[in-house]
Image: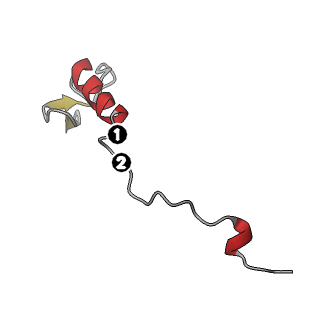
Amino acid sequence: MTTVVKCPTCGKPVRWVPENRFRPFCSERCKQIDLGAWANEKYKIGGTDEEPPSDDTSRGDLN
């Protein structure tokens, strides 16, 4: 049985088979649309812009 997923861009059903070189996308067009969204920073991974404290300040004075 072949697995079928939805194209992340347009929602069309996509067969998850080695012959589908665009998987998980349905086409080159949908793949490029998704790449463009990443390039334009429309997708972001959660978190803060703050840098974590360096090792020197997080451990305190151990000497």
List the residue tagged with mark 2: 44
Residue 41 is marked as 1
Residue 2 location (% of width, % of height): 23, 33
Q: Quadrant of the C terminus?
A: bottom right
Provide the secondary structure element on which disc 1 rests: loop
Q: Position of residue 35 (x, y in %)?
A: 33, 29
Alpha carbon of mark 2 to alpha carbon of mark 1: how far? 7 Å
Residue in front for this viewpoint, 56 or 22: 56
The picture quadrant where one finds residue 36 is: top left
Q: Amino acid at mark 2?
A: Lys
43, above or below 24, in the image: below
Quadrant location, the N terminus: top left
Along the horizontal axis of the image, is 7 left or right of 44?
Answer: left
Q: In the rendered structure, find residue 12 and report the number of the disc placed on it.
A: none
The answer to which quarter of the image holds residue 32 is top left
Give the image location of residue 11, x and y in percent.
14, 36
SS for callout 2: loop
Instruction: Give coordinates of residue 6: x percent, y percent.
Output: 18, 37
Residue found at x 19% / y 30% = 14
Residue 18 to residue 2: above or below: above
Kindly identify the residue that appears in the image at 22 percent across and 25 percent down: 30
Q: Residues within 10 Å of mark 1 (few under 14, many from 20)?
A: few
Mark 2: few/some/many CA within 10 Å (<14, 14-19, 20+): few
Count of labels in the image: 2
**Residues under numbered marks 2 and 1 in contact, where contact means CB atoms less than 8 Å apart:** yes
